[in-house]
Amino acid sequence: MDVRRLRLLWELSRLGSMHDVAAELRTTTSSVSQGIAALAREVGTPLVEPDGRRVRLTPAGHRLAAHAVTILAAVDTARADLDSRAEPAGVVRVSGFATAIRRSLLPAMDELARLHPGVEVRVHEYEPLEAFDLLARDDIDLALTYDYNLASAPWAPEHEVTPLWEIEWGLGVPSRDRGREFADYADHDWIVNSRHTADEEVVRTLASLAGFVPRVVHRIDSLELLEDLIVAGRGVGLLPRRRPSRRDVRVLALAEPTPTLRACAVLRRGRSQWPPVRALMDLLVAG
């Protein structure tokens, strides 16, 4: 159904004559008549009928004109929403891992609320592999994800990836331990992420370079719980070096190749120009 023809019908219902519609829209009466006739063919029923020297809407024409009000309003709203010059407004659905939400998203949300109060951000905590599925299904608009220099993410052709920041990681061990090198923990149990495979890939890569196969026993999502297991002597695992840790946990610096977590913002290609997303992205990158 042609939106321009719907507008002709709505104007006719409002103004009462094709001549007035033509004057309002700066076109000819003939063009108005032809447009409404074409719309009647599209819907398969007459929309106007003679009324003396003029025309009036049929019952079907009145019903369609009523629908046209809602349809045209929605179209106008969509155009304004997508106008790159418009003030950003709308809901942006963001998934992210906990560190990125705390470090990047929450400060950006505060600034966004100040600059563009019409934008609402809804936060969902997910690991990268989960976020990629959500992006593919259009269940989220933006994903804050990560990979490592030793375990690159499987970016898809439709992904638009913007780097945000990097953090060096080390090996979390009990403070009482005397080990200094990665290889010193070859006979320990190991702890990896339960919801993402990247840090296990890093552990296995580093272990291979050190000449052993790690015995992965525990799979934990929370860094705080990982630290609890380390303190309890239940294993060792990777931790960020710049993150405050418990006093009884020591994070060893690792020799080259040093594992580095790389945080990034991921969109589906072509979505970055939607004003609310662009406004949030500008703040994330600036932060």
Image (spheres, rainbow, N blue to C red):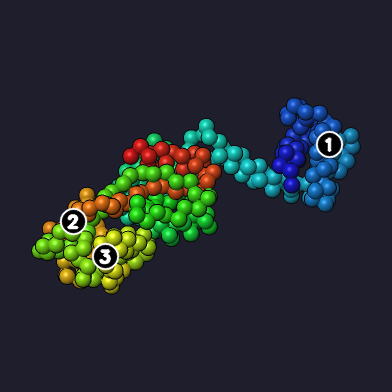
The answer to whether residue 216 is seen in the rendering is: yes
Residue in the image at 43% along x and 60% along y: 130
Question: Does residue 97 lie above or below 190 as drawn?
Answer: above
- Residue receiving disc 1: 33
**Relative to 57, residue 178 above or below:** below
Give the residue type that dot 2 points to: Leu
**Residue for point 76% across, 32% down:** 21
- Foreground disc of the pair 2, 3: 3
Question: Which residue matches tag 2?
Answer: 252
- Secondary structure of residue under mark 2: strand
Query: Could you say which is closer to the camera, residue 61 or residue 125?
Result: 125
Rounded to the nearest angstrom, the CA distance separating label 2 from label 3 is 19 Å
Of callouts 2 and 3, the N-terminal one: 3
Tag 3 residue: 211
Q: Nearer the viewer, mark 1 or mark 2?
A: 2
On screen, 112 above or below 153?
above
Amino acid type shown at disc 1: Ser
